[in-house]
Image (cartoon, coloured by chain):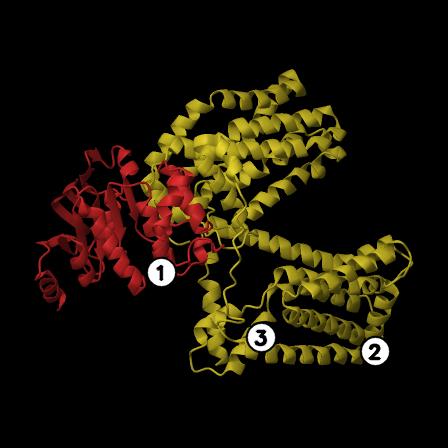
Amino acid sequence: MIHSKNITKKYGQTQVLNIEELEISKGQSFGLVGNNGAGKTTFFNILLDLIRPSTGEVINHEVVVNKSEAWKSFTGSFIDETFLIGYLTAEEYFDFIGDLRGMNKADITSFLSQFEEIFNGEILGKKKYLRDLSKGNQKKAGIVAALLGNPQVVILDEPFANLDPTTQIRLKKMLKELTENKEVTVLVSSHDLSHVTEVCERIVVLDKGNVVKDIETSEETLKELESYFAV
Amino acid sequence: MFTRFLKLEWKKYFRSSYWQKGIALKIIMGFFALYMMVSFLALGIGSFFLIRKTMPDSDPLQVINSYLLFAIIGDLIFRYLMQKLPVMDVKPLLVLPIKKNKLVNYVLGKSMFSAFNIFSLFFYIPFAIVLIIENYSTAGALGWLLTMIFLTQCANFLNFIINKNNVAFWTLAVLLVGTIALQYFNIYDITIHSQAIFDGIFANPIFVLVPVVLLAALYNINQRILKQQLYLDDAVKVKIKEANTADLSWANRFGEMAPFIKNEIRLIWRNKRTKTVFLTSFVFVLYGLVFFPQKTYQDMPGFLIFASLFVTGGFVLNYGQFIPAWESAYYKMLMTQNLSYRKYLETKWFLMSIMTTVLFVLATPYIYFGLEIYLMIAAGALFNIGFNTLVLLYAGSFNRKQIDLNASGFGNTQGTSAKQFIVIIPVMLVPVGLFYAFSLPFGVNAGIAAIAGFGIIGLVAKNYFMNIIAKKYIKEKYAAIHAFDQKA
């Protein structure tokens, strides 16, 4: 469960985020949508204690994220390609992250084997550094790394951008499976309305830092969102 | 069109990250550039008189001429290793309505003004002026100068044709080493031919036309080659190096530090800038040779202490001062991982200590200069391990400048700020001050012991200080993340 209380973020006079109360229950698939500058990434960065909020706090499974670091052991995330270590090969990167998450070599290998289809022979065993992979393949590596070590919370910023159609479909399936038995909480943000409505049970729309919609996904959600964003 | 290209170059130059630096750094770098220029000028002006003084029976021009062939081959080898055709710059222009011929001429024309061609002018031009002043024939001196300029340009274009061809490189290398060897063992004297060629040009300046024709031919060949290669999968292609995946599983014995140690090794070995730092730390070992053999410094032990610190301190100083900015590109990610700051910092401490120890072992031959010097180096090594590592780690928590690991290493000051200069005070001046504080009343040995003692105190109290440093890093985390996000 993630509980965000009275979170605001100000840079000088401009307020970029103002979320009074947001509770994401355990096992929920949560989607965040909004135009550029709506505050999606800022919110995720605050959840990950990469940015300090001006006011308020985030509680991730009873851990206040800027007070203790205990949340790190059960939270996996991929925000952008700066999360990758460019001079490592994909294998070395997975080993590094896996090591930090307490997995041994065999755990990591067996974990990675389930992603063979997604990797499509272009990521593992290629003798290429991550910095030399295409944007799409970098994203794949980053998302898979975020899932290493059975995290209870998975935070992905724009996971569908730059992915090829096959992987988009596979990723959607994967994310749905993750939340199936209500153990893992998944938070994604996206510009693609149809993707989020497909994956998420709950969608929050941000506009200039404020929550303007908080929808339980249903048949009509996509239409509702499309009409909201059509100006 | 030409003026547009010129405008592009202008903007490229003045908007490069070089100019985005603080004023202090600009001034220091400006001084350094000026110093280099003045030294070259001095060499150009002075070499004539220097040769006349050391070899009074020979003509300085002829002496220079006899070695010019070596210089030209050496220049080609240097270019082969360092110079690349700036072809990537035209990538955004490829799809614009500009004729390919123009792009080719732009790239080639631009290369004519590269630093590789300008640098030697600082020698040739003043030398030619001195010749004229010294009543050599003006026409001859000008012809000679023009020949040298054209030959430099020829080397420029020949290098692009060679274009990283290994066979050509080894031919040149063998040629250079071979001729020098033949010369050295008095088997065959190539300098006679070198002298004959360039003396001939001096006597008959009309021969300057030969390099002109050569240059035109080389330019033309370049034009034709480049025009055919102006494609994204050919010349305008980002070269991707194959990953070198050495097995580092031996590092697993370091337990919790293992993943970080493996990462540090890869960080250093796979990025240009860090690799340069790593390799220069071995060059620093030689630093003592500047001071130890000289009589003048024997009475100035402060300088000897200074040198001793540098001998083993190359890695600690050059690598340590940019911790954790080396990892600025993915610092954000590290901060979301389940890692202990202590272990993370411990790895860096460990790495610096190991490297200092290795450098100390390499410095063993300095014992030749006497036991006292050797003890100074040993004390310096202890100080570097015990004290400087901790100071630099602590100072690292104030690093706020991003470093692009892919940028080249030489003369790259990215990540440098006033902080880097301030930290020199404890790291370099404290030991010298400490030395004098103890050596003046109690003798040189007491001074050396004081430095070593300080290092040992640091070693003993390491855990205490590391905890403080780790706390400092946690506190500075947000500021560092924010700053590392800004592109330098």
Q: Is residue A119 left or right of residue B209?
A: left
Could you tell me how far apart the alpha carbons at marks 1 and 2 are, in whole angstroms?
64 Å
Give the amino acid type for the residue marked by disc 3 in the picture.
Answer: Gly
**Secondary structure of residue under mark 2:** loop
Q: Is residue B467 left or right of residue B28?
A: left
Task: Tell if the residue under mark 2 belongs to the same chain as the one under mark 3.
Answer: yes
Q: Nearer the viewer, residue A209 or B118?
A: A209
User: Residue tagged by mark 2?
Assistant: B204
Can residue B85 be seen here? yes
Q: Chain of mark 3?
A: B
Query: Are the residues at dot 3 and dot 1 in contact (C-beta closer than 8 Å)?
Result: no
2 or 3: tag closer to the N-terminus: 3
Q: Is residue A12 visible?
A: no
Q: Color used for chain A?
A: red
Question: In the rendering, what colour is chain B?
Answer: yellow
User: Residue at horizontal 58%, vertical 33%?
Assistant: B356
Residue type at mark 2?
A: Asn
Give residue A158's position: percent from left, percent from top. Answer: 26, 56
Residue B109 circle label = 3
**Residue A122 placement: quadrant:** bottom left
Seen in the picture, residue B24 relative to B121 is either above or below; the reply is above
